[in-house]
């Protein structure tokens, strides 16, 4: 095992291969507060990549309700239970990663889902943690709660799928950090399906190989954001490239949201994979649950998110979510607008920090009618 | 001509190197190299005269890949002890197949190898948690009695040829490839690309199958011919495949025959009167065996072809 630095854990950890960060790293930020589980992303991904035979229950992108929705069934609670209670230890994680916890003869602690675990991709939809009794009113955080968690492959810095593959069929691209399964080399052992704690490689019973989210690499190569990002009607996603913490660029909206403002957190960082999709935690959910799912810093993330209006740079970055199809490499806030630029510095989009408000009279004199909506 | 003088061995090595180069952009081989080094220390290639597998001459000129062929009757089986693979990760500490019978025959044109082992359940449908029964024979691409490759998948510069029979491939060959509807009888699916798109466009949605990955389709042959130079390097030989074979059930036993031409210009050079060494592996799909999770024979078995 080699020693690699995982900034999510704040420490070095063991990984089967040497740590080599790619020239650029595919990244995504998702605002869970804005997701309504319309599944437009799921359908966009499905029709683009997985409509074929053997892919019937395969969703590279899925949106599940938390805490009781899962795809595949129980994916996170099963691996959390196997890993056992760990010492989170604050800013430096003191517990075991899945690599540390590998049983004898295995490369990682994992489990292979049952085939039927994929049969109900939207199981647990909208289930909340309990019933609301008559006459009750909501307080924050909510006493009964649920929220939506959209998920793709995390294109991890230290991918468990790549580490698990016994025949070197999985590789991480140097140019963008996207993790791919070579479909000419895969022999369908399902070690990646077993090893990935996020369960984002899937077995295809027709091709008899494992397949996974390809990060829409043809789009990325031509400077465009992924299908799940550009089709999102709630504009909850921003896809681009995320820097390592020692190379943060404040004019990269992903870097600003993740590294500077620290309002977005990785999913289950304790697994030790350094996943590269980041989530703005749901503001209404009890911190104890969020702490387990997003690690330390969730309370800071929520507090900062609530005050985004006070930080024009953060507000500007958040408003660039879903603002254009192209990847935004640079951005700036200019007066009352946020401007996004491509890699060459050409302007892609500008959005107002505050939408103009027009107030109409309650009573329309011409039609002699009362308006119910005046803004 | 230089093209003809290029040995298959060197071409296959180049094939592996190319494939490896494509997929190893960031990865390193540290673990594999260490494991290979450890194995070379633990399992030094042995060349024992006993047991010895002899391929006696039988009549005819046809391929010897029929497990029901009469030509096996005269062949004396060698009983192999199969062990749990616990050296290279991921391992399989508990295996269900602990012995296997091996026979060999040759007819001057082909060599045939017959493998028989007990496996109570047939596993020939592949789903996420369903694996297939398999068996494999391994031998050095270039045989040298005093310089045998590491029996565990060969080693750099000393490639091994591996012939693997798969039960799901045999099912494909016998009954056609199972459709999704056959695997999941209650499935309902709205639309497949091949129902609405021109064939060429629909092919884009067929993944490994459309790329010609041999694991996707067994209708051409139930056996795959591959080469390896160490852990993680196993590579199919593509259209250079010369091996073929067939597996049948006899009660609770799998009986699998594999056949290979003798005296060829390319590939494994086997001739009447010649010799090589064989390694074996067997997988019980019902036990979750696949890849390195298998039962294997830890010593080379000498094979002598009679004249």
Image (tube, rainbow, N blue to C red):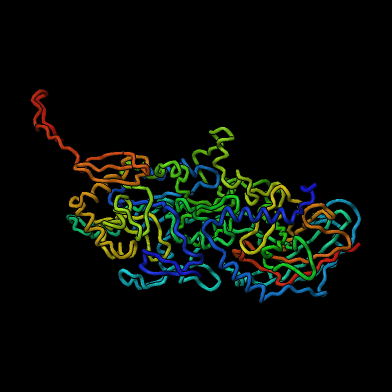
The quarter of the rendered structure image containing the C terminus of chain B is bottom right
The image quadrant of residue A72 is: bottom left
Which residue is found at the position 28% from the left and 55% from the top? Answer: A282
| Residue B120 visible in this rendered orientation of the protein | no
Residue at the extreme top of the image, as rendered: A366
Give coordinates of residue A274: x percent, y percent: 40, 61
Give coordinates of residue A82: x percent, y percent: 44, 69
Residue at the extreme bottom of the image, as rendered: B42
Which residue is found at the position 64% from the left and 56% from the top? Answer: B17
Instruction: Say whether residue B97 is left or right of residue B32.
Output: right
* Label tally: 0
| Residue B160 visible in this rendered orientation of the protein | yes
Instruction: Say whether residue B257 is left or right of residue A26.
Output: right
The residue nearer to you, when weighing A281 against A115, is: A281
The residue nearer to you, when weighing B8 against B86, is: B8
The residue nearer to you, when weighing B60 against A334, is: A334
The image quadrant of residue B128 is: bottom right
Instruction: Say whether residue B273 is left or right of residue B4.
Output: right
Please tell me whether residue A359 is drawn above or below residue B224 in the rendered image: above
Which residue is found at the position 34% from the left and 42% from the top? Answer: A345
The image quadrant of residue B274 is: bottom right
Please tell me whether residue A315 is drawn above or below residue B154 in the rendered image: above
Give coordinates of residue A75: x percent, y percent: 43, 60
Give coordinates of residue B185: x percent, y percent: 56, 47
Instruction: Say whether residue A125 is left or right of residue B126.
Output: left
């Amino acid at each position: 095992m080699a020693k690699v630095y995982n900034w999510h854990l704040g420490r070095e950890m063991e990984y089967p291969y040497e740590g080599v960060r790619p020239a650029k790293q595919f990244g995504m930020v998702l605002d869970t507060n804005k997701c309504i589980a319309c599944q437009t992303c799921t359908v966009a991904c499905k029709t683009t990549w997985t409509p074929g035979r053997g892919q019937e229950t395969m969703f590279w992108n899925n949106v599940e309700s938390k805490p009781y929705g899962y795809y595949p069934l129980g994916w996170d609670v099963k691996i959390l239970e196997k890993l056992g209670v760990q010492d989170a230890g604050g800013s430096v994680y003191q517990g075991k990663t899945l690599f540390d916890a590998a049983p004898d003869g295995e490369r990682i602690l994992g489990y292979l889902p049952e085939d039927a675990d994929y049969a109900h991709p939207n199981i647990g939809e909208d289930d909340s943690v309990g019933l609301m009794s008559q006459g009750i009113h909501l307080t924050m955080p909510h006493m009964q709660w649920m929220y939506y968690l959209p998920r793709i492959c995390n294109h991890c810095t230290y991918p468990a799928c790549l580490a698990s593959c016994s025949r070197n069929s999985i590789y991480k691209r140097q140019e963008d950090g996207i993790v791919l399964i070579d479909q000419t080399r895969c022999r369908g052992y399902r070690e990646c399906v077993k090893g990935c704690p996020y369960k984002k490689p899937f077995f295809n019973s027709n091709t008899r190989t494992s397949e996974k989210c390809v990060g829409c690499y043809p789009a990325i190569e031509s400077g465009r954001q992924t299908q799940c990002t550009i089709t999102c009607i709630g504009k909850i996603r921003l896809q681009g490239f995320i820097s390592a913490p020692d190379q943060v660029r404040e004019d990269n909206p992903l870097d600003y949201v993740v590294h500077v403002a620290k309002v977005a957190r990785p999913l289950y960082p304790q697994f030790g994979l350094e996943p590269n999709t980041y989530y703005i935690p749901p503001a209404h959910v009890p911190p104890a649950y969020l702490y387990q799912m997003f690690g330390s810093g969730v309370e800071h993330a929520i507090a900062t998110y609530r005050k985004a209006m006070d930080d024009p740079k953060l507000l500007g970055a958040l408003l660039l979510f879903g603002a254009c199809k192209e990847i935004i490499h640079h951005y700036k806030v200019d007066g009352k607008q946020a401007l996004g630029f491509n890699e060459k510095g050409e302007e892609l989009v500008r959005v107002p920090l505050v939408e103009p408000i027009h107030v109409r009279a309650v009573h329309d004199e011409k039609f002699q009618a009362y308006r119910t909506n005046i803004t | 001509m230089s093209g003809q003088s290029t040995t298959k061995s060197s071409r296959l090595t180049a094939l592996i190197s190319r494939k490896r180069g494509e997929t190893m952009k960031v990865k390193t081989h540290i673990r594999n190299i260490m494991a290979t080094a450890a194995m070379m220390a633990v399992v030094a290639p042995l060349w024992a005269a006993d047991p010895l597998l002899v391929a006696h001459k039988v009549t005819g000129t046809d391929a010897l890949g029929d497990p029901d062929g009469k030509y096996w009757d005269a062949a004396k089986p060698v009983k192999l002890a199969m062990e749990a693979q616990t050296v290279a990760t991921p391992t399989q500490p508990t295996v269900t197949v602990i012995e296997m019978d091996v026979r060999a025959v040759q007819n001057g044109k082909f060599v045939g190898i017959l493998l028989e082992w007990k496996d109570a359940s047939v596993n020939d449908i592949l789903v996420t948690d369903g694996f297939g029964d398999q068996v494999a024979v391994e031998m050095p691409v270039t045989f040298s009695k005093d310089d045998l490759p590491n029996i565990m998948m060969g080693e750099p510069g000393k490639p091994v040829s591996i012939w693997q029979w798969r039960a799901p491939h045999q099912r494909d060959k016998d009954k056609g490839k199972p459709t999704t509807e056959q695997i999941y009888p209650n499935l309902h699916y709205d639309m497949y690309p091949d129902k609405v798109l021109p064939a060429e466009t629909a092919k884009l949605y067929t993944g490994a199958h459309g790329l010609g990955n041999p694991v996707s389709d067994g209708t051409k042959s139930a056996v795959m011919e591959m080469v390896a130079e160490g852990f993680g390097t196993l590579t199919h030989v593509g259209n250079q495949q010369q091996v073929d074979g067939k597996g049948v059930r006899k009660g609770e036993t799998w009986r699998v025959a594999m056949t290979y031409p003798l005296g060829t210009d390319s590939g494994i050079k086997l001739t009447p009167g010649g010799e090589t060494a064989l390694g074996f592996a067997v997988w019980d799909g019902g036990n979750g065996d696949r890849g390195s999770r298998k039962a294997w024979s830890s010593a080379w078995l000498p094979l002598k072809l009679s004249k």
